[in-house]
Amino acid sequence: MTQRVLFPRKVTREELNSLVDKAADLIRTAVDYKFILVLLFLKRLNDVWKVEKQQVKERLLKEFGLSEKEAEEEAEKEVHHTFNIPKQFLWDEVTKEVKTLPEKLATAISEIAKLNPELQGVINRVDFLEFARNQENRELLRQLVELFNKYDLGGEEVSPDILGDAYEHILMKFAPEKAKEGEIYTPREVIRLMVEILDPKPGESVYDPACGSGGMLILSHLHVAEKYGEEETRKLFLFGQERNPEIYAVCQMNLILHDIKNANIANGDTLDYPRFRENERLKQFDIVIANIPWNQDGYGEERLKKADFRERFSFGYPPQNSADWAWIQHMLASAKENGRIGLVVDNGCLFRGGSEKRIREKIIEKDWIECVILTPEKLFYNTGAPGAIIIFNKNKVPERRNKILFINASNEYIQHPSVRRLNSLSKENIDKIVNAYKKFAEIAGFSRVVNIDEIKNNDYNLNVSLYVMPIEEKEEIDIFKEFSELEKLDREREEVKRKVEEYIFELKRVIGE
């Protein structure tokens, strides 16, 4: 049997992060991190189910006078629970016997997915039977279950914020490694910066066409909760599409653990087959936000002409080796007439020539670009190069028309708290950038408002450093102090020379004797 804790206790944020760190250390060189995510998710479902059952049972006993047995049976029925989980498929039942652990987990996941359509294709993406083919992995699975058995993950004390943070903690921990395999995890500080600028509000819709693990949508939800109150998040409508089925599953679980129930996430290739449609047209949103796949190849003119809603690409088709401006056009087409758009891109798309330049020219002429931000280097897990954030606004206020704000934030960073080779953004860094955007302010060496005519004269080049460069701090030199130091060094040199001469004289005398 797996080691069980008779009375598992509630877990704090620090304890849960420590717990998933231990789980990560166990699997680091053995299997995919998604096994931890699924186990954490299943344990949470189990413990919430038990809390729901206890609450219903107590109410039935108190208000309806049912017997203990009657109340117990009634409280286990599907109608009283967030998810339909028959008792035999609960974590506590499935993990009782270590010998049958992989088989029972696989069966439980399959059955729970069948009974809950929103979990179909989400929790059943990992194969515990394949995972446990060798004895080492079976033992690893036992140790993982034993870790999660230590704490109760249900109840009000373990809030969605704590569970969501733990989930994000796992994603961030494996981000540097998974980046090598093409999985992109956008640093949450970068997302926070973009969300602060775009400022989603209750009643608005937010869409991420390359949503990955859901960070843009989750932080938009948290922004509204913090600014307007938790109740108002019900009026925020979240949409996302992700091509990779496994990352789509991670996104769905991430949203559920954050207790976000109003998100609509689709699986599929956004450029070929955008899933969100309305009245036979591309659905449009108040805010469109994404960290697009940088320089994605394979989406040239021939392919995009066969894609659904090819009218998205009315400004032109990108080259075969970089779909940056295809993504940008999709996002612009997905925004309402007064929509705000923000995306992270590779710097190269700001100034490359050819078909990209022709598309860029037309969009600049439309006066939809509001702000271009150069980020610091070493901010992203998949590249050391700096990125750029472009903010589009289809309906600029009059005083911003025919102008673009350039912000050079290349020096706005702190050292990453856990990854030595990376940088990060502090709250102060974010606030400085956001305030400059909101005020459309000119700050020497940091931000500058540029008329579109100047950009045209620069051949439609949007490279931030062309318009604003950080002011290099000039070191003030105290001539008298420097001369004094030089004299001191000369005296020390003369003293060393004198001692060396004495040693040589003494050495010659000894040899001569």
Image (cartoon, rainbow, N blue to C red):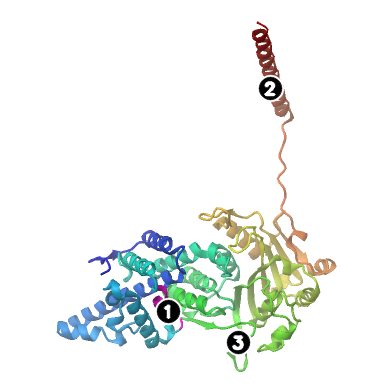
Q: Nearer the viewer, residue 413 or 25?
A: 25
Q: Is residue 122 magenta?
A: yes
Residue depicted at 58% across the width and 59% down the height: 431
Q: Is residue 290 magenta?
A: no
Q: Looking at numbered disc 2 in the image, what kind of residue is underneath it?
A: Lys
- Please identify the residue farthest to the top as the structure is shown: 513
Residue 106, image quadrant: bottom left
Mark seen at residue 283: 3
> Residue 462 at x, y = what percent?
75, 66
Q: Are marks 1 and 3 in contact (CB under 8 Å)?
A: no
Q: Which residue is mark 1?
A: 123
Q: For the residues carrying marks 1 and 3, which lies nearer the camera in this image? A: 1
Q: Are marks 1 and 2 in contact (CB under 8 Å)?
A: no
- Which region of the structure is painted magenta? 121-131
Residue depicted at 80% across the width and 67% down the height: 455
Q: For the residues carrying marks 1 and 2, which lies nearer the camera in this image? A: 1
Q: Categorize mark 1 by other alpha carbons within 10 Å: few (<14), some (14-19), many (20+).
A: many
**Would residue 212 be seen by someone viewing this image from the given angle?**
yes
> Residue 123 at x, y = what percent?
42, 79
Q: Which residue is mark 2?
A: 488
Magenta segment, prevailing SS (helix, strand or loop): helix
Distance from the alpha carbon under mark 1 to that under mark 3: 28 Å
